[in-house]
Image (cartoon, coloured by chain):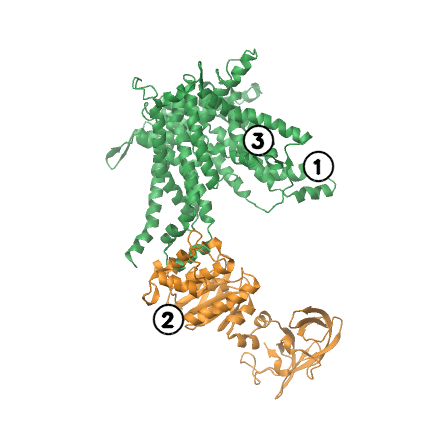
Amino acid sequence: MADLKLEAVRKAFADTVALDGVSLDIAEGEFFTLVGPSGCGKTTTLRTIAGLESPTSGTVRFGGADVAGVPTEDRDVGIVFQNYALFPHMSVRENVAYGLQFADPPDGQSVEERVTDLLDLVDLSGMGDREPDQLSGGQQQRVALARALAPAPDVLLLDEPMSALDARLRETLRRQVKRIQTELDVTTVYVTHDQEEALAISDRLAVMSDGVVEQVGTPREVYERPATEFVASFVGENNLFRGEVVERDGDGTAVSVDGTEFRIDDGLDGRDRNGGEALTADDRLTFCVRPEDLTVGADANRFEVAVDTAEFLGETTRYYADWGDRTVVFRTPEAHEGDALALGFDPGDARVL
Amino acid sequence: MRPARAVERLSAPVLAVTTVALLALLFFYPVGVVLVEAVRVDGAYTLATVVEVLRDPFYFGVFAQALDDPGVVVRSFPDYRLGLFGFTAYQALLSTVAAIALGLPGAYVLARFEFPGRKTIRSLTALPFVMPTILVAIGFVATFGANGVVTGALQSLGLQVESFTGTLGIIVLAHAFYDAPLIARITAASWEGIDAEMTETARSLGASPLRAFRDVVIPQLLPAILTGALLTFIFSFMSFAIVLALGGLSLATVEVWVYHRISQLDYGTASTLATMEMLFSLALTYAYLRYEAQQRAAGTARPPDRIDLLGTATKRRLFAWGYALVALVVFVVPIVSLVFASVTGPEGFTLRNYRFLLERQASAYAFQVKPLTAVTNSLLFGAGTLLLAVPMGVFLAIISTRQFRGRKLIDTLSMAPFAVSGVVVGLGLLRGFVFGTEAFGYRFTVTGALAIVAAHAVGAYPFVTRNVAPALSGIDDAIVESARSLGASRARVMFDIELPLVVPAVLAGTAFAFAISIGEFDSTVILATGGSSYTMPVAIERFIGRRLGPATAMGVVLLVVTSVSFVIIDRLGEGSGFGG
């Protein structure tokens, strides 16, 4: 087990900058997720931790020690890739045992005991003699997980391990991975482009975009208090409102968006967003309101919209409505396409970005 | 660091240095010897011999004449003297045209028709890559020679013919036999990659079927045809065994003349000519590789439905049937004639020729060819070639799939033997090693047998590399990275994961290397001193004209070995790397 630190890691390829000063502090035993759209640098970050890429500048520390120049095979990491990457010429048992040639099994176990334990752990008892191509995708992924965990690595690295599986199986496997991680208490870095998965599985997560970490926090912090416009719109659905400050007083801030005035609690105690000068009238300001916080017939912050599209999602319905030339998203059980409605939201539900 | 790991880390550089050293010893040094001899006379460096050759009409025909007297270009029009180089290019051009004429209809039939055995015939089009040229020569002698099957058939019809060998036509036909399948193969692959929807779109826009073919299909086939044509030209330009066996000195090409100069112990002229030819063939090969590299565009095309070859006679079917008949005569008859000639004699059916191969011939004079020695030599040299060529080829394949500075250079250098003829390698090894080389105050000499194995290894390892390299680079990076993250060093990953996964490709490469060795003629005939290091191809060439029976029997043995190798390559390998 080890904690993991990235300090101002920069990675430049011939024509692109993949990572532009990434700093992360991942605690021992933590389940930490890197989430972001494709090309944001999350996989490069993972590969840098693994030693499969060397950073152009910056430092990676395992348990405080700088690992620059330490090759992958000496880093005590376990990796699970999206496409499983099982050794096709070895049985399931040989795959799981492979890493135990280079590191003794923990707790004085024999190799056979360790392999049996791990196959039990991933619910593949009795499958040891199968060949990888005789297994389903989900089973192959669990073999890959068992193989990565067998030498008891300090850090477990999972690179989009479930994106090749169908949705239902993904949710089952997700819970299993989380259970195993908790049980073994191994420091885990998980890469995914699926923000819902990231929220569901992580102790903490880092939202990345264009090689930069936009925000680090617990799933609840990131969802409820997005730090940037990117986080606000990438994690969950959101409605962004861009306007100008009309006035500020003890009750909050009045913001004018295209002539409609909203009153919001900015949560800034009169400070500027960046801790600099206080916001004053005519300053530009962006805030967001979650779809579930926009309600029909609310008392405050009302505005008239025309419902354009309804999407029935099962437990709820998602509506897209026109407000002037903008589109807002909201959820309510009681609207229809073509309806003209008055939506509103509680001043406390708005988040200033 | 554990000591075992330190050894593992050292293994890669050690292997790299060994391979490069072997390459230098077996290939670059001998070729260098030829280059130096070309410009050195009596210990002094001079371009005199080169200039002499360039000004000699015997070599450069009208070009050489024009250097002294430009008026000759006008006076002798159009009846130019070609000279040796001109004739070589001329016969290569004729061969290319013939191969295209014979290959393109084949491509059409393969790409557009469906018939039983189509896939088998399609894979057989790769056979020329492993088929020894001397086998084609003996097959053609058995068909068109003085006692040939076709010659005999024509005579029994009352026609006054003696033999077709010794003519330019038969050389061109033999080259076409050899290269038309390649053209058919490369073009058919490209043809199958043309989406039916393109032609259908052209048709929907108003084009007639013929017009759509001309506007849509032909432009897309052209690069493939040019690729095949360039390859055929290179092969025919450097062709040696076929020209030597079917044409002799009266129809000599540069290669044959170089061999002739060597046998007359005129190594200076041989080196000069060989160098000039090598520069030309290197330039052509470079052009070929550049051009081929531009063609790599694979799509998921939906080719049009194939036409059933059997059915009522339509214009297309009649054309295909006609071609099938021609193909039968050109491709099948020489091979059948070869087998037929090997089991017949004046007394009718006989196994005498095969028994002759197993005779030790204790009574034979030292200068005579001993058939059993030739058979065992071929097998021994083949085994020796594998010992050198397979590790070298595999290692160069590993190098060519790694990213590091200077990789491109090693890639290019390691593929250079493709472009250098066996005659040149043989000449270099003869001058450099068999005659001895001085280093560190000692004179090193090697025997002809060792030099032959070296020459075969040089000719064979690129085929190992071209089979193994694609298989290696096809392995998912994530598999290698997984193994490394589990604690395996780079070298361990190679032995535990990568090599086991490319075993089929290595076997295919091995079969390729063996086939190349057992069929190699060009350098062997130069290095085979006396009768003791003759191989089957060399023995065949010696027997042609004198003992057709034993020659054809040996040809059949070669044919069997080649066919077995081919089946292994076809089942397990990636092919030659030429046009799939």
Please name the residue that numbered disc 1 is placed on.
B209
- Specify the quadrant of the image occupied by residue A225: bottom right
Q: Residue B114: x, y in percent?
A: 61, 36
Mark 2 Cα shell of 10 Å, populated few (<14), some (14-19), many (≥20): few
Specify the subunit that label 3 lies on. B
Residue A158 position within the rendered picture, expressed as x and y whole percent measured from the top left: 47, 64
| Residue shown at 70% from the left, 37% from the top | B209
Residues at marks 3 and 2, CA–CA distance in whole angstroms: 69 Å
Residue nearest the observer in this picture, B339 or B377: B339
- B441 on left or right of B57: left
Chain B's colour is green
Question: Decide: marks 3, 2 in contact (CB < 8 A)?
Answer: no
Task: Report the mark closest to the observer, 3 or 2.
Answer: 3
The chain that hosts pointer 2 is: A
Left or right of A79 in this view: A337: right
Badge 1: few (under 14), some or many (20 or more) residues near its Cα, within 10 Å?
A: few
Q: Which residue does the numbered mark 3 point to in the structure image?
A: B103
Q: CA distance from mark 2 to mark 1?
A: 73 Å
Which image quarter holds the N terminus of chain B?
A: bottom left
Amino acid type for the residue under numbered disc 3: Gly
Identify the chain drawn in orange. A
The residue positioned 47% from the left and 23% from the top of the image is: B339
Residue picked out by circle 2: A64
Residue B543: which quarter of the image? top left
**Percent position of residue B246, x then y:** 47, 21
Residue B573, how many percent across, how many down? 46, 41
- Label 2: element kind: loop
Q: Earlier in the sequence, mark 3 or mark 1?
A: 3
